[in-house]
Amino acid sequence: MATEGNVLELPKESSWYSPSKLKHYIGVAIKDYPVLWLTILFVVLIFPALTAPWTAPHDPLKQELSKRLTAPVWSTGSEDKPPSWSNIFGTDKQGRDILSRVMHGSRISLMVSLSALAIGGTLGTTLGLVSGYFGGWVDHLIMRIVDVFLSLPLILMALVIVAVFGPSFWTAIGVISVLLWSRYARQIRAEVLAIKQMDFIARARVSGASNTRIIIKHVFPNITNTLIVLATLQVGTVILLEATLSFLGAGIPRPNPAWGVMVADGRDHIASAWWIAVMPGIAIMLTVLSMNMMGDWLRDKLDPKLRQV
Amino acid sequence: MQRYILIRLIQSVFTLIGVSIIVFSLARLSGNPLDVLLPDEADDETFERISELWGLNDPWYIQYFTFVKNASRGEFGPSFKWQGRTAMELVFLHLPATLQLAGFSILVSVVLAVPIGVMSAVKKGTLLDTVGKLIALLGQSLPSFWLAIVMIWIFAVKLGWFPTSGRGGFDHMILPGIALGWFSVASFMRLTRSSMLNVLDSEYIKLARIKGLPEWKVIWKHGLKNAAIPPLTVFGAIVVGQMTGSVTIETVFAWPGIGLLALQAVNARDYQVIQAVTMFISVLFIGMNLLIDILYAYIDPRVRFT
């Protein structure tokens, strides 16, 4: 009876929602669990981008005016237009299926971002390598050009370029690559400057290797990790940039189902038909989020030097 | 120090020349501006006369020098969309609205980012830190134009708390301010956190603790004061980022600033105004960076010798 106070108190079974557990779950989901972002990436970007023409339920451009502004399937909808499983995310002003358009939008986003990264990344890396390796006036010249491109107002310049050349798929890719290369050049140059001081470069030079050979065989392999991380982190930025340009009418031209264009289309109907603008926006958000998570993860794995940035 | 300032100054001038070449050639790439400006019924003689008057028949380098000469005096010529106003006048007319919005959104991002950044450094590895990371991740992934539209839908249309667009009282400023500031919260917060982590490790913080100062004083006075330098260096970039980012936000909210002016000018092919806006923002950006670099070199002498 009197032993009650003497019993060693066992730790209470902590409930699943205690702060420490919750923190653990979030932490696991963000950091130590690539499965999460890999799943999002696959579902939102890669799968629809690769298979949209066959797996999308409808033609993204086909207008069905009788079905216009149908609400998504989970909402109550209106009397005369009940939501149906045929248009899971609802339809837009012209009766086009939102889900199919979002799926085809992934294709556009992926193509634009990969092409722009390939062009801008190659140009920037080459110039960064040359600038960092040779130094001197070449370095000064390239770095001043980089400064110029970094101090131009990005979106405004893109708008002007598109106004001059007219909006098209290739103008969008061109504009984004032109605006992208300077960041690569600067980062790669800094990396090369450090590598240049290493002993193995001096040894290569002593053994008679040409500059081209040293750059390709000895410097480049040492920046690939940085390059991979940089590219991954840039995919999100590029997708956001493309969406912003398309939203402003300076990216992918209508009627292509680019996500930014879709948000712009839904803007006027936000009060009555929120799904037109919200759905593609969620697609942008999830894609960029998962790309950024992947970039952070890769950075921790591949390039500890960048970690603190 | 003088040497450093001089080198940075010369570099800035080169950057400025580069920017002016690009801005100049972009407008010329679109062809003869007179094709757009003159009415269709204008005959060849008028065409010739005005070309001569505006110096459009001169070789490109003379045209470029005229452009630079006029631009350095802030003269970009008359706007053709907004009749009777010069391009620079229009920029200054729209500047207060943009500055107001940018100022407010910076306030929003600082008020949100600094406390969260500091606290997630102090309580590193706790739930608070994780939530901070989550906010930073979201901040970098949400498209600002979409956030703006969704906020209009929820807070202006559904709840009716704020007006949907336009410039007016303080309540007009809240939605666009948050939409614009949201993006910089993430970068500001991460920087504050990492800088604060470095500072908290230092000897003088230990000394402050040993001396028996209350913890809040250690963190907010001794800690934050020293941790504030790196975030301050990106501050300039953020301020100018707000001004360019304002193109989208000002469009969504019909906020009458230079972002909206630029978009309207682009749509109307009003190259005088486009040139004025682009040069204005670039000069601001270059000047801001120069100022911050010099300030930084003043605070941290190691910078001067690299």
Image (cartoon, helix red, strand yellow):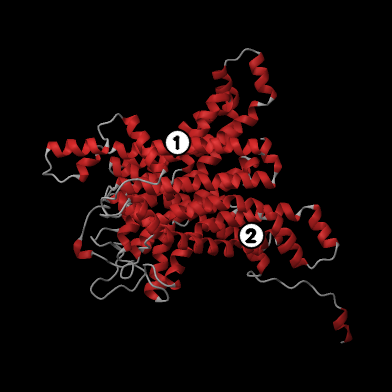
Camera sees residue B21: yes
Horizontal arrangement in the rendering, residue B145 relative to residue A77 (left or right):
right
Identify residue for label 1: B17
Q: Position of residue A27 (x, y in %)?
A: 62, 58
Q: Secondary structure at mark 2?
A: helix
Above or below, comparing residue B146 to residue A139 in the picture: below
Above or below, comparing residue A202 to residue B140 in the picture: above
Camera sees residue A281: no
Amino acid type, label 1: Ile
Q: Are marks 1 and 2 on the same chain?
A: yes
Q: Secondary structure at mark 1?
A: helix
Residue B117 - label: 2
Count of labels shown?
2
Q: Earlier in the sequence, mark 1 or mark 2?
A: 1
Q: Residue at x 35, y 30 (%)?
A: B61
Q: Residue at x 64, y 50 (%)?
A: B230
Q: Report the quarter where the N terminus of chain A lies.
A: bottom right
Horizontal arrangement in the rendering, residue B42 relative to residue B257 (left or right):
left
Q: Nearer the viewer, residue B163 or B142?
A: B163
Query: Which of the chains bears the disc numbered 1?
Result: B
Residue A280 picture quarter: bottom left
Above or below, comparing residue A105 to residue B153 in the picture: above
Query: Which of the chains bears the disc numbered 2?
Result: B
Q: Position of residue B263 (x, y in %)?
A: 33, 53
